Image (cartoon, rainbow, N blue to C red):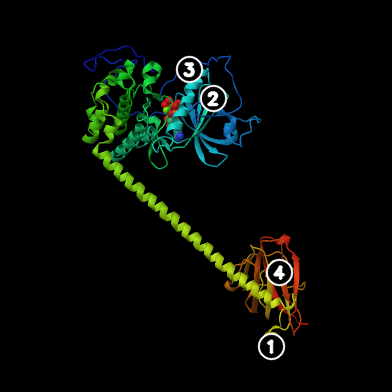
């Protein structure tokens, strides 16, 4: 936090800017330093917070939402869904998420990468560091939830899912982003200018959604901008967001001193302060400049003295935009709308809209193709079931003279198939030894797969007629012997074709052409095949040698 003493404005210019605290005299701008995550800023030792003893500590998790009609905070455990069991010892966080890693930390919270046990997806959960010391402190923390709820629909603001409080801490479940803009810069160092323009456009659009509602962000910095999976930048950390009017009633808190606008030192909070912070963040991003937190360089950057050595790396057009955004006098800084009217941004927005349209059309084509294909498949199924019905009716009619007998085959057939026995075997597919003709009438339920295989060795010893044993899988199927519904098939077992089928239902009956040389007797045999569900079975038809 910056010690803001009163300073005067002369002719609209700042006479002398306050210097937060000068650690050492540094007069040279430097490139950004690579910091390890834990030594970015020295922190004072943690004091044990003193709690308001009257403050009610509740161990049950309550969902926090401001989405109700009266826009007041609703804390309700029933909003957390049926998965939460408050009688268990585990917290809501433990019950509903698997914590995978800690991915960030700020002054108010720690952020974890988690996997939801509800839907299996990855999220980020921000857990407040400090316990609620008082009702006022709690209200301040909950304000962030209100802001996230307000902006999470915007493409360039971080998507928010839900918030809850438990044991005097606030938890927020949010979209998981790849990394912050700060770590992206540390990794890349030299970011192409096209990318910088695109990032600036993303952030201006996010800022517009706040400024249009008369809200100030007050903590714009690279660490609070996240990169989503689609490469777009998202403004995050709405912890300091405040209404312009309330901000100027001394209720606002200034953000990181490296990005703070000069007029904030006079307690002058306005939308222009966000423009300054965004401008200086763009300077850091495009020039890989280490921003001072205090000292003469801090003053220079707020008095229109720029590090020209660094600036010459970027185009004049970008330099001008950044310089405009960092104008010392807040009244002369451009507004978001003014910046967005820049020709370059207008062209970029047009191009983006164009691509959005193209992508929408692509998605629509993909969807309609899928729809057409599934309609075609349904149609195919209807046609197949129609033919299957015809076939089954035809088969029944053949049987209709006597429910248990087939009509006699022709003499040719009789000669070829004087006596048949059907074996349903399993463990090995059947090799064909028989020159016979068999008729099988199988009445299955829906999922029966009926396939056929030949040229696989047949295991002998099939003396137990009509016995079904477990099976081994088929290698391929014969097209003329495939169906899924009630089916009546004639199989000519001419050296090669041995029927086999996969059983998915526990019972079926089949008719075995089993008997005489004059008329083939049909025996309807109900079989208990429950143990063979899902298995492929093979059938062999022998000539009876008796
Ligand atoms: N949704 C997210 N996905 C990935 N990383 C995140 C996400 N939210 C936060 N982080 C990481 O955690 C860090 C801290 O988060 P955040 O800025 O929300 O906390 P904070 O305590 O409010 O910070 P500050 O000190 O800026 O007030 C971020 O800088 C970012 O690196
Ligand atoms: Mg932050």
Mark before the other along the chain sequence, 2 or 3: 3
Pointer 1 residue Cβ closer than 8 Å to ligand 1:
no
The answer to whether residue 408 is above or below residue 252 is below
The residue depicted at 25 percent of the width and 30 percent of the height is 310
Quadrant of the rendered image containing residue 51? top right
- Name the residue beneath numbered marker 2: 169
- Name the residue beneath numbered marker 4: 425
Mark before the other along the chain sequence, 2 or 1: 2
Q: Distance between the residues labelled 3 and 1?
A: 104 Å
Q: Distance between the residues labelled 1 and 4?
A: 29 Å
List x then y, in percent, for residue 497.
63, 76
Taking 500 as reference, is 296 left or right? left
Q: Distance between the residues labelled 4 and 3?
A: 79 Å
The answer to whether residue 526 is above or below residue 363 is below
Q: Pointer 2: residues within 10 angstroms few (<14), some, or many (20+)?
A: some
Q: Which quadrant holds the N terminus?
A: top left
List x then y, in percent, for residue 251.
40, 18
- Name the residue beneath numbered marker 3: 45
Mark before the other along the chain sequence, 2 or 4: 2
Q: Please identify, in this view, whether the residue under mark 2 or under mark 3 is nearer the observer.
A: 2
Tag 3 secondary structure: loop
Q: Pointer 1: residues within 10 angstroms few (<14), some, or many (20+)?
A: few
Tag 2 secondary structure: strand
Answer whether labels 4 and 3 touch (C-beta < 8 Å).
no
Mark before the other along the chain sequence, 1 or 4: 1
List x then y, in percent, for residue 314.
24, 35
Tag 4 secondary structure: strand
- Name the residue beneath numbered marker 1: 411
Mark before the other along the chain sequence, 4 or 3: 3
């Amino acid at each position: 936090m910056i010690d803001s003493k009163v300073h005067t404005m002369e002719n609209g210019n700042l006479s002398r800017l306050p210097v937060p605290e000068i650690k050492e005299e540094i007069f040279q701008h430097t490139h950004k330093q690579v910091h390890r995550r834990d030594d970015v800023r020295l922190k004072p030792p943690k004091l044990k917070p003193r709690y308001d003893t009257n403050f009610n500590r509740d161990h049950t998790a309550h969902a926090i939402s401001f989405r109700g009609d009266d826009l007041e905070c609703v804390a309700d455990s029933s909003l957390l869904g049926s998965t939460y069991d408050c009688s268990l010892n585990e917290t809501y966080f433990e019950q509903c998420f698997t914590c995978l890693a800690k991915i960030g930390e700020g002054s108010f919270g720690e952020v974890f990468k988690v996997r939801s046990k509800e839907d299996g997806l990855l999220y980020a959960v921000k857990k407040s560091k400090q316990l609620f010391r008082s009702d006022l402190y709690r209200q301040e923390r909950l304000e962030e939830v209100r802001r996230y709820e307000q902006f999470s629909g915007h493409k360039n603001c971080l998507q928010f899912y839900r918030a809850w409080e438990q044991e005097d801490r606030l938890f927020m479940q949010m979209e998981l982003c790849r990394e912050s803009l700060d770590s992206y810069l540390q990794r890349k160092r030299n970011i192409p200018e096209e990318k910088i323009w695109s990032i600036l456009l993303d952030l201006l659009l996010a800022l517009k959604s706040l400024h249009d509602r008369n809200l100030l962000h007050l903590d714009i910095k690279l660490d609070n901008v996240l990169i989503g999976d689609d490469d777009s930048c998202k403004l995050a950390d709405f912890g300091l967001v405040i209404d312009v009017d309330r901000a100027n009633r001394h209720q606002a808190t200034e953000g990181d001193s490296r990005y703070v606008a000069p007029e904030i030192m006079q307690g002058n909070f306005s939308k222009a302060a966000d423009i300054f912070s965004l401008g200086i963040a763009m300077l850091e991003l495009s020039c890989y400049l280490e921003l001072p937190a205090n000292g003469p360089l801090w003053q220079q950057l707020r008095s229109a003295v720029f590090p020209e050595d660094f600036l010459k790396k970027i185009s004049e057009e970008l330099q001008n935009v950044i310089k405009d955004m960092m104008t010392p006098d807040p009244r002369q800084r451009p507004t978001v709308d003014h910046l967005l009217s820049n020709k370059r941004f207008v062209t970029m927005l047009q191009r983006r809209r164009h691509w959005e349209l193209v992508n929408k059309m692509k998605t629509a084509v993909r969807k309609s193709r899928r729809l057409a294909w599934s309609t075609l498949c349904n149609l195919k199924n209807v046609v197949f079931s129609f033919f299957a019905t015809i076939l089954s009716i035809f088969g029944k009619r053949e049987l209709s003279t006597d429910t248990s007998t087939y009509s006699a085959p022709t003499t040719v057939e009789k000669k070829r198939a004087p006596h048949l026995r059907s074996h349903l075997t399993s463990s090995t597919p059947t090799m064909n030894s028989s020159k016979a003709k068999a008729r099988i009438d199988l009445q299955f339920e829906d999922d029966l797969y009926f396939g056929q295989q030949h040229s696989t060795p047949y295991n002998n010893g099939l003396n137990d007629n009509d016995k079904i044993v477990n099976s081994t899988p088929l290698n391929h199927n014969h097209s003329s012997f495939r169906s899924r519904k009630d089916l009546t098939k004639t199989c000519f077992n001419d050296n090669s074709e041995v029927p086999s089928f996969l059983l998915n239902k526990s019972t079926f009956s089949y008719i075995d052409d089993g008997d005489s040389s004059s008329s083939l007797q049909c025996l309807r045999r109900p079989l208990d095949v429950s143990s063979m569900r899902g298995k492929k079975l093979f059938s062999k038809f022998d000539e009876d040698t008796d």
